[in-house]
C-alpha cells in the first residue's frame, strides 16, 4: 500500500505546474484586464469629432459666365483660344454680317425715304417753293447711292407736283381773267345800251306828242318803238351775260379753293402716313443696327476662356445656344462639394470644416480651416441621375501662403471637404448601433 501511495503522490507532483509558470499567467491576466479597462476608459471619456465628407471642386463665387447669342448667326472668325485670358469688352468671335448688314441697309433706306418724303410734304403743306432736307440726309446720300437716288426722286416729284398744282390753279385763273374781260365788255355794252335806251325813250316821247298834234308820221313813231324794244332787249341780254360772267368767276374761284383744300387734305394724310412709316422704319433701323453691333461678340467681363463649343468657320449657331464659357478672374473662389442625402442633416451654414486639396501632396499643404457658407434648400440631380445636396465653403485668402512655391488655387481644382459635426466618445460610436438595433427590435 505504501508503495502505491508513493507512486500516486509522485504522479500528482509531476502533473502540477511549477510555481513560476503560475505567476506568469497571473501577470498576463492582469495586463489584459488593465489594458481592456484602460481602453474602455479611454473610449468612454475621449471625444471624437464626427465629420461629413464631401467631394467637389473650386469654383468662382460669381459662377462661370456662359456666352450665348440673342439672334442666330454664322461663325466667321473665332478670335480667342481655350484658356486665354480676356478683358471685359474684348471681342471673342466675329459672326457673318451679310443678313444683318442687308437688313440694316434696307431699314436705313426706308427711314431716309420716309424722312425726305415727310420733308417734301411739309414744304407742300406750307406752300413753300423750296424743299428743306432733314438733317443728315445729305451725308446719308453721299454715303449710299440708293439714298441719293431717293432724295433726287423726291425732289423731282416735288417740282412735278408744284407744276401740276400751279397748272390747275392757272387754268382757274385764266378762266377768271377771261370772264372778267367778258364781264367788263358786257358792262360797257350794257351802259351804252342803257344810254341809247334813255335817249330813244326821250325821242319817242317827243314824237308821240308831235304825232298827237299831227306834226309827225306814224311810221317814225313805230320805228322808235321798235328801236326802244330792241334796246331794252339788248340791255337785258347784256345784264344776263354780265351775271353769267360773274357766276363763272365765282365758280372758278370756288374750284381754286377746292383745289387748294384737296391738296392740303391729301398732303396732311400723306404727311401723317410718312411720319408713321418713318417712325416704324426708325425702330426697325435701330433693331437692325443693334443686331449688326452684336455680330461681334465681346466678353461681358474679364475672365479665362473655356469650353469653346464652335471652332469651324461657317458653323451655324442658334439663338440662346452656348458658344463658350468665361471663368471670372476677380471673383472669390469657393469650394463647392456634393453631400450625400443621408448626411445633409449633419451639415448647416456656419459649421466648421477643413479642406484638403488633392492636387497637392498632403505633407506639403496642411488641411485648411473654413466654414460652410451655403447649403442647397433641396436635393439636386445630375445628368447621370445621382441625387445630392450642394454645399459651398469659404476659401480664406491666407491659404495661398500654405501652398508650395509657384502653386495657386484655380477654378476647377478638386477639393475634399470634412465638415466637422458633434463630438462623441469612441464607446458611443461602438454602442450606438447596438442600442439603436435593440430599440428597433423592442418596438417591433
Image: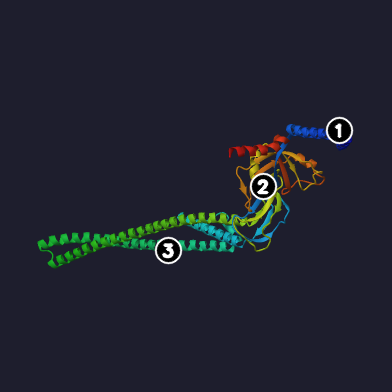
Answer with left or right where residue 306 lies relative to residue 366.
left
Residue 23 is tagged as 1
The quarter of the displayed image where residue 133 is located: bottom right
Q: Nearer the viewer, residue 280 or 346?
A: 346
Q: CA distance from mark 1 to mark 3?
A: 147 Å
Residue at 44% across, 55% down: 268
- Element under disc 2: loop
Q: Is residue 99 left or right of residue 59?
A: left
- The part of the image, by quadrant, that contains residue 366 is top right
Above or below, comparing residue 353 to residue 128 in the picture: above
Q: Circle 1 — which element?
A: helix
Given the current orientation, which residue lies at the most extreme bottom position?
219
Q: Which residue is mark 2?
A: 63
- In which quadrant is the C terminus drawn? top right
Residue 52 lies, in percent from the top left, at 69, 41
Query: Which of marks 1 and 2 precedes in the sequence?
Result: 1
- Residue 425 shows up from this direction: no
Locate the N terminus and report the quarter of the image it occupies: top right
Question: Pointer 2 and pointer 3: residues touching (CB < 8 Å)?
Answer: no
Residues at circles 1 and 3 in contact by the CB criterion of under 8 Å: no
Quick one: 139 or 174, which is closer to the camera? 139
Residue where numbered disc 3 is placed = 167
Amino acid at each position: 500500500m505504501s508503495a502505491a501511495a508513493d507512486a500516486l503522490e509522485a504522479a500528482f507532483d509531476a502533473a502540477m505546474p511549477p510555481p513560476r509558470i503560475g505567476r506568469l499567467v497571473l501577470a498576463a491576466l492582469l495586463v489584459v484586464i488593465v489594458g481592456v479597462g484602460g481602453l474602455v476608459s479611454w473610449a468612454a471619456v475621449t471625444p471624437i469629432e464626427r465629420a461629413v465628407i464631401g467631394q467637389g471642386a473650386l469654383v468662382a463665387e460669381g459662377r462661370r459666365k456662359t456666352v450665348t447669342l440673342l439672334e442666330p448667326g454664322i461663325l466667321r472668325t473665332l478670335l480667342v483660344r481655350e484658356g486665354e485670358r480676356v478683358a471685359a469688352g474684348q471681342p471673342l468671335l466675329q459672326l457673318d454680317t451679310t443678313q444683318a448688314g442687308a437688313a440694316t441697309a434696307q431699314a436705313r433706306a426706308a427711314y431716309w425715304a420716309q424722312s425726305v418724303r415727310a420733308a417734301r410734304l411739309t414744304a407742300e403743306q406750307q406752300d413753300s417753293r423750296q424743299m428743306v432736307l432733314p438733317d443728315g440726309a445729305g451725308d446719308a446720300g453721299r454715303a449710299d447711292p440708293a439714298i441719293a437716288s431717293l432724295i433726287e426722286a423726291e425732289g423731282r416729284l416735288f417740282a412735278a407736283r408744284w407744276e401740276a398744282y400751279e397748272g390747275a390753279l392757272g387754268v382757274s385763273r385764266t378762266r377768271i381773267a377771261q370772264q372778267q374781260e367778258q364781264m367788263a365788255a358786257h358792262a360797257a355794252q350794257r351802259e351804252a345800251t342803257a344810254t341809247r335806251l334813255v335817249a330813244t325813250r326821250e325821242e319817242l316821247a317827243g314824237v308821240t306828242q308831235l304825232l298827237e298834234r299831227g306834226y309827225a308820221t306814224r311810221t317814225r313813231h313805230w320805228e322808235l318803238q321798235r328801236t326802244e324794244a330792241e334796246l331794252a332787249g339788248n340791255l337785258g341780254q347784256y345784264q344776263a351775260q354780265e351775271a353769267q360772267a360773274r357766276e363763272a368767276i365765282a365758280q372758278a374761284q370756288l374750284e381754286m379753293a377746292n383745289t387748294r383744300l384737296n391738296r392740303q387734305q391729301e398732303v396732311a394724310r400723306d404727311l401723317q402716313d410718312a411720319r408713321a412709316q418713318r417712325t416704324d422704319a426708325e425702330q426697325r433701323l435701330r433693331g437692325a443696327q443693334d443686331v449688326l453691333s452684336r455680330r461681334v461678340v465681346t466678353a461681358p467681363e474679364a475672365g479665362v476662356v473655356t469650353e469653346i463649343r464652335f471652332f469651324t468657320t461657317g458653323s451655324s449657331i442658334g439663338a440662346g445656344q452656348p458658344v463658350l464659357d468665361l471663368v471670372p478672374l476677380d471673383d472669390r473662389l469657393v469650394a463647392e462639394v456634393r453631400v450625400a442625402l443621408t448626411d445633409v442633416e449633419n451639415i448647416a451654414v456656419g459649421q466648421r470644416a477643413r479642406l484638403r486639396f488633392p492636387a497637392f501632396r498632403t505633407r506639403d499643404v496642411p488641411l485648411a480651416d473654413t466654414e460652410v457658407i451655403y447649403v442647397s434648400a433641396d436635393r439636386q440631380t445630375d445628368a447621370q441621375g445621382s441625387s445630392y445636396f450642394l454645399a459651398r465653403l469659404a476659401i480664406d485668402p491666407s491659404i495661398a501662403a500654405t501652398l508650395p512655391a509657384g502653386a495657386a488655387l484655380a477654378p476647377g481644382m478638386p477639393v475634399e471637404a470634412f465638415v466637422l459635426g458633434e463630438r462623441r466618445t469612441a464607446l458611443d460610436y461602438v454602442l450606438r448601433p447596438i442600442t439603436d438595433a435593440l430599440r428597433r427590435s423592442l418596438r417591433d
